[in-house]
Image (tube, rainbow, N blue to C red):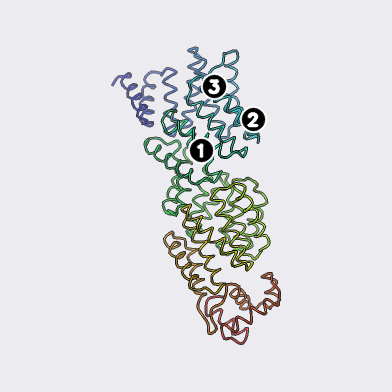
């Protein structure tokens, strides 16, 4: 086969988006006789999309020199720009700055052109990194105007997307989301090049996750998955796609599939060199292992997440809680809450803090955290935040004995989680509803709620939650005087540990008089006459 025929095959493969095949064919033609600048450019694109990132960077540098030799300044500038962008996103700021500076120098004295618009994009990104979204918005707006005037859809789409993310940072969420949706129209319609399409897809989904817009995240993740599936030879963006899919699957309760996707994302994002989101992929895998009760695997994955730059909190603190290491969990989540101020991550930390603080009976701290969550939910309005806040508020009210208020919050939480199609969180809310019903003496409703939650946990493989529900079910066994309330069970456990009324009062944050009343109720309900008999009962019924 002649070189010309091999080259034509490479063009045909590029046209049908068979990136690995195109790379092989164009490389074969290049070995026979060096490609011209435009074909080197094509080969660089095929290299990037088929996962050969270092080769793609070398080819872009070669194309840049080839364009310069041919006197094509504008195309040479494009190559320098793309190299600068890639190095910028991979964290190689010095090298990125060098290529972007070269692009600016080459444009000195040139009349306004599309490349001037592309040069504005890193300026906008830098403004966002420096905490000046207003300046970023103005810069992206200028870039969008240049893209529109020169009918350069890639530039216009990237600039619109930048404007949208800047507006979201400015607190103008709805306006920002509308611009992101507009940018996605160009992507889903096939109006932009593959690299721009993948970049905008992943960035918009990331923005949806930051704003806790789960419905949009799910919609765009499905679209990204279809886009990736239509290009089976594409490696770039597949890792991010798998990670986003794992997040959506976890929420929807498909934990086995989610874990498989997270593990595949770890593999994709670690080759040939670790990508910036590799730590997030390991964290997602760790979370799924923790929820499934696979604690050893979770521990390993949290450590890998930390190794690749993603803090393992709050998941690691929740793992310690599940392992019964209450002091370690409390210390870790307290430190994390003090350190995390990022508005996109703080709600998740607050949610974990409430659960752990209640486990160690630090009700005042849990109440304060739940109050902050409620304030964030009111300001933001996202359905996910409302669900998290309602769950936390209900749990705190239950611990405080405000049973009617707890039921109101918890039923709202269960409803919101169901609307979000989040079965695990909805079932956890129903467990707390069951405990609140028991406190009111409504054991029939409590048993029904526990049974419904148990079915969900069983289908999910949520072993730790399932064991918790089984323990609550065992605790519902009636004595001669009737079943105990949740608080009475707590008191009984402390009696079995040898605690005095004063010790119990200090531990539970209640008065000795209240403890004495609980002890009296326990003796009457269980037909017992002494603390020794109460201790024996606790051990016999697995309450100690």
Residue 95 visible in the snapshot: no
Mark 3 crowdedness (10 Å alpha carbons): few <14, some 14-19, many ≥20 = many
First in sequence: mark 3 vs mark 2: 2
Mark 2 crowdedness (10 Å alpha carbons): few <14, some 14-19, many ≥20 = some
Up/down of 437 relative to 164, above or below: below
Q: What residue does disc 1 label? A: 204
| Residues at circles 1 and 2 in contact by the CB criterion of under 8 Å | no
Distance of mark 3 from mark 2, alpha carbons? 17 Å
Mark 1 crowdedness (10 Å alpha carbons): few <14, some 14-19, many ≥20 = many
Distance of mark 1 from mark 2, alpha carbons? 20 Å
Q: What residue does disc 2 label? A: 135
Q: What residue does disc 3 label? A: 146
The residue tagged with tag 2: helix, strand or loop?
helix
Residue 422 visible in the snapshot: yes
Side of 501 relative to 31 (left or right): right
First in sequence: mark 1 vs mark 2: 2
Up/down of 367 relative to 200, above or below: below
The residue tagged with tag 3: helix, strand or loop?
helix
The x, y position of residue 323, in whole percent, is: 55, 63
Q: Which mark is residue 425?
A: none
The x, y position of residue 26, in whole percent, is: 37, 24
Up/down of 6 relative to 336, above or below: above
The residue tagged with tag 1: helix, strand or loop?
helix
Residue lying at 39% horizontally and 25% vertically, measured from the top left: 27
First in sequence: mark 1 vs mark 3: 3
The x, y position of residue 237, in whole percent, is: 45, 37
């Amino acid at each position: 086969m002649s070189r010309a025929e091999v080259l034509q095959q490479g063009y045909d493969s590029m046209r049908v988006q068979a990136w690995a095949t195109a790379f092989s064919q164009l490389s074969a033609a290049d070995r026979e006789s060096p490609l011209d600048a435009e074909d080197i450019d094509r080969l660089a694109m095929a290299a990037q999309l088929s996962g050969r990132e270092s080769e793609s960077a070398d080819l872009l540098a070669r194309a840049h020199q080839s364009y310069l030799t041919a006197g094509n300044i504008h195309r040479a500038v494009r190559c320098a720009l793309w190299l600068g962008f890639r190095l910028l996103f991979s964290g190689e700021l010095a090298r990125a700055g060098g290529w972007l500076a070269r692009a600016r120098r080459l444009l000195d004295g040139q009349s306004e052109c599309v490349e001037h618009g592309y040069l504005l994009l890193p300026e906008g990104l830098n403004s966002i990194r420096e905490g000046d979204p207003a300046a970023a918005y103005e810069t992206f707006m200028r870039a969008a105007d240049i893209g529109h005037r020169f009918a350069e859809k890639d530039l216009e789409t990237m600039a619109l997307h930048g404007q949208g993310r800047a507006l979201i940072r400015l607190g103008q969420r709805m306006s920002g989301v509308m611009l992101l949706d507009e940018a996605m129209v160009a992507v889903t319609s096939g109006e932009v090049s593959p690299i721009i399409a993948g970049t905008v897809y992943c960035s918009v989904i990331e923005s949806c996750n930051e704003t806790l817009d789960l419905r949009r995240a799910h919609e765009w993740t499905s679209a990204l998955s279809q886009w990736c599936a239509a290009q089976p030879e594409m490696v770039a963006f597949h890792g991010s796609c798998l990670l986003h899919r794992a997040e959506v699957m976890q929420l929807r309760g498909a934990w086995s599939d989610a874990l498989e996707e997270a593990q595949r994302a770890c593999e994709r994002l670690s080759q040939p060199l670790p990508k910036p989101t590799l730590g997030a992929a390991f964290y997602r895998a760790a979370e799924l292992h923790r929820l499934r009760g696979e604690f050893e695997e979770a521990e390993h994955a949290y450590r890998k997440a930390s190794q690749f730059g993603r803090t393992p909190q709050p998941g690691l603190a929740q793992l310690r809680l599940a392992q019964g290491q209450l002091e370690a969990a409390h210390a870790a989540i307290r430190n994390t809450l003090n350190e995390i101020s990022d508005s996109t991550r703080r709600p998740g930390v607050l949610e974990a803090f409430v659960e752990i603080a209640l486990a160690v009976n630090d009700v005042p701290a849990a109440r304060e955290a739940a109050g902050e969550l409620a304030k964030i939910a009111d300001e933001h309005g996202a359905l996910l935040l409302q669900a998290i806040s309602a769950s936390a508020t209900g749990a705190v009210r239950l611990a405080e004995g405000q049973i009617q208020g707890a039921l109101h919050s918890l039923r709202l939480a269960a409803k919101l989680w169901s609307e979000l199609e989040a079965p695990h969180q909805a079932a956890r809310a129903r467990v707390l509803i069951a405990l609140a019903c028991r406190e009111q003496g409504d054991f029939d409703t409590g048993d029904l709620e526990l049974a419904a939650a148990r079915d969900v946990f069983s289908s999910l493989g949520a072993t730790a939650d399932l064991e918790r529900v089984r323990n609550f079910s065992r605790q519902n066994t009636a004595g001669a005087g009737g079943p105990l309330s949740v608080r009475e069970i707590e008191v009984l456990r402390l009696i079995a540990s040898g605690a005095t009324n004063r010790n119990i009062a200090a531990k539970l944050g209640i008065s000795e008089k209240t403890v004495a009343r609980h002890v009296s109720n326990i003796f009457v309900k269980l037909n017992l006459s002494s603390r020794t008999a109460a201790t024996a009962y606790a051990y016999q019924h697995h309450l100690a």
